Image: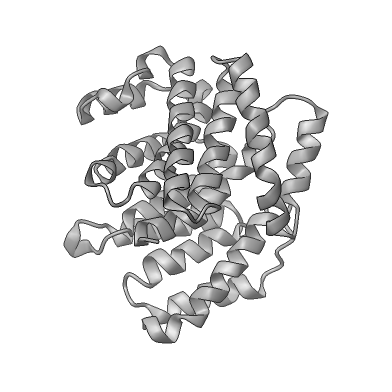
């Protein structure tokens, strides 16, 4: 897996929280809670494909429904970017995620119906015109785009789309997205620490985004600390920070409302990073 792939594999998982709640009704709320508070990631991993097929059928029945398209975009992004090891399958799944994300945003905002064909300035103008009512659609579009880039990270054309994704995420933050804020900060932290400063990265900007994400989540979302250690700590060879963040993850209580599943995954990643630290540093 490429460095870009490793970065996105962990963070895309954090988007799953709102996926299963997108289908209305008490049952979907209960299903969402059961998944998010599950301590066995393997069980959830095995269950997700059935839910993906359910969303496909709902999208076939309601092809312009923003909420259903957004849910499909995020779930396919989760599965394709983080839970599939075969590159070919990941490319197919994230391509569908991207399609659903584009359709969700188009259904929410007519001016956003041809984003992939716009130059950067035109894209920026459209993104900045999106208001609070459509922030969830913009979020699912952004996450699906990240997943697609991850699956096509050997393609320069795909990597060239990163600045557009960053613009989208920054606009989400400007809309004060509430529960989306902490994870959005994490994604922005990662985008700014993918490259060292000498190659155009902005690691100090990334550090500020990570710190803000930790503060907004009150330290309960352990995945932010893992990505801070991986993205910033390793990039700057700051082992003291790297080990402190990961040891905090290892010592933390994973049981947090709607974060237990992702905190379990974060601990798995923290363990691997600590085990490889001597070799890396």
Task: Give the side of residue 183 with respect to residue 251, left or right.
Answer: left
List the single residue furthest toward the bottom: 278
In the rendered view, tell whether residue 85 sits above or below residue 131: below
Residue 142: image quadrant is top left
Q: Position of residue 107 (x, y in %)?
A: 48, 16
Task: Give the residue drawn at x 36%, y 44%.
Answer: 149
In the rendered image, residue 261, in percent from the top left (x then y), is placed at 68, 55
Identity of the residue drawn at 39% across and 34% down: 171
**Residue 97 drawn at (x, y percent):** 48, 35
User: In the rendered image of this protein, does residue 184 appear above or below residue 10?
Assistant: above
Q: Is residue 73 above or below residue 274?
A: above
Of the pair 238 and 12, the residue shown nearer to us:
12
Query: The N terminus appears in which quarter of the rendering?
Result: bottom left
Furthest-left residue in this view: 198
Residue at image x 50%, y 34%? 140
Q: Nearer the viewer, residue 95 or 177?
A: 95
Q: Is residue 143 visible?
A: no
Q: Residue at x 32, y 20 (%)?
A: 114
């Amino acid at each position: 897996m490429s460095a870009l792939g490793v970065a996105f594999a962990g963070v895309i998982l954090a988007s799953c929280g709102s996926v299963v709640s997108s289908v209305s009704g008490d049952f979907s709320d209960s299903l969402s809670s059961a998944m998010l508070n599950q301590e066995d990631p393997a069980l959830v991993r095995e269950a997700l494909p059935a839910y993906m097929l359910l969303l496909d059928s709902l999208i076939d029945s309601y092809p312009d429904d923003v909420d259903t398209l957004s849910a499909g975009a995020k779930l396919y992004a989760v599965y394709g970017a983080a839970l599939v090891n075969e590159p070919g399958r990941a490319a197919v799944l994230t391509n569908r995620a991207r399609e659903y994300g584009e359709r969700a945003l188009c259904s929410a905002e007519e001016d956003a119906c041809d984003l992939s064909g716009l130059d950067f300035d035109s894209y920026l103008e459209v993104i900045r015109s999106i208001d609070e009512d459509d922030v969830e659609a913009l979020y699912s579009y952004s996450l699906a785009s990240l997943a697609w880039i991850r699956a096509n990270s050997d393609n320069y054309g795909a990597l060239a789309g990163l600045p557009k994704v960053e613009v989208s995420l920054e606009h989400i933050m400007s809309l004060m997205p509430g529960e989306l804020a902490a994870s959005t900060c994490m994604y922005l932290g990662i985008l700014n620490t993918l490259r060292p400063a000498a190659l155009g990265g902005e690691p100090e900007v990334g550090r500020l985004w990570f710190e803000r994400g930790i503060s907004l989540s009150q330290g309960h979302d352990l995945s932010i600390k893992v990505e801070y250690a991986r993205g910033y700590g390793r990039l700057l060879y700051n082992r003291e920070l790297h080990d402190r963040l990961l040891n905090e993850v290892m010592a933390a209580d994973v049981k947090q409302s709607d974060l237990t599943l992702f905190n379990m995954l974060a601990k798995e990643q923290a363990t691997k990073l600590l085990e490889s630290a001597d070799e890396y540093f």
